[in-house]
Image (tube, grey):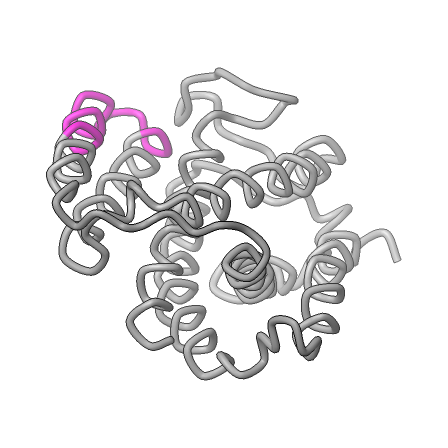
Amino acid sequence: MKQHTYTLIALGIFFGPFLLSFHPLVFFIQYLPAVVISVLVVGGLYIVWDSLAVRWGHWRFNPTYVGEVRWLGLPPGEWLFFLVVPYACLFVYEVSRVLFVVTSVHPSFWWIQGILALGFGVLAWVWRRQGYTSLALGSVGLFWFLSVFLAPGIVSSSTFWFFIGFSMFAFVIVDGLYVNLPTIFYNEKAIWGIKIFNIPLEDFLYNFSLLGLVLLVYLQFR
């Protein structure tokens, strides 16, 4: 059972949001086609990143908690992670739209997103010799760059920031479990070494870009 810990945590993330997806207040299940497209497109991209990161030695998985089975270098629970986490967080996005006041999106603020894209791109180049750090910074820059065209003004949306804020709160709990068991070991040469609750700072950037990109694709098909 111990070797299935990673998978069981991922299933636990999915269980609550899926059951509540049928609640008439939000009826999130109606958006399932858009959710599936966004999860497959962005999740597929991050599975490739994850697989390459293992090959490049940015991190490795602990067989004690993830088992010995690997698909493209990744345990089954890691594949499941990229399906259930975006689903759960998009559910949070829709709930926040129903329960909280939504501030107007100001498309004229697109230039702020452009500056953020440029800033993170520059930082990714500065830390280009530090594998995970550079990729994490670059992924955030990619999100802000694409948001200029796909969601101009999203930086002014309270719903967006609630989505990110709540997701980050949940992320600290879940990723905290993963890194403190530990299910994963990081190559200290590939990261800054700055950690919050033992979670590398790069993981927060990774999570932000994953959820941000999932949301961008979702909004195109919703």
Q: Is residue 132 magenta?
A: yes
Q: Position of residue 212 (x, y in %)?
A: 37, 51
Quarter of the figure with the C terminus: bottom left
Q: Is residue 187 above or below residue 113?
A: above
Q: Is residue 76 above or below residue 19?
A: above
Name the side, left or right, on which 156 lies relative to 182. left
Looking at the picture, tell me which residue is in the foreground, 189 or 49. 49
What residue is at 46 percent from the left and 77 percent from the top?
36
Q: Quadrant of residue 45?
A: bottom left
Residue depicted at x 43% and y 41%? 161
Q: Provide the residue span drawn in magenta.
A: 119-133
Image position of 146 with respect to 56: above or below:
below
In this view, the residue in front, 106 or 89, is 106
Q: Quadrant of the N terminus?
A: bottom right
Counting from the top left corner in percent of width and height, residue 9 is at: 74, 54
- Residue at screen point 60% across, 71% down: 26
Answer whether residue 126 is magenta in the image: yes
- x and y, in percent, of residue 181 in the image: 76, 35
Q: At which x and y percent is residue 142?
A: 22, 46
Q: Residue at x 65, y 60 (%)?
A: 77
How many marks overall? 0
Closer to us: 149 or 156 = 156
Magenta region, mostly helix, strand or loop?
helix
Q: Is residue 49 left or right of residue 93?
A: left
Occupied quadrant, residue 195: top right
Can residue 70 be seen from the camera position used here? no
Residue lying furthest right in this view? 1
Asked whether residue 46 is in view, the answer is: yes
Q: Is residue 3 left or right of residue 172?
A: right
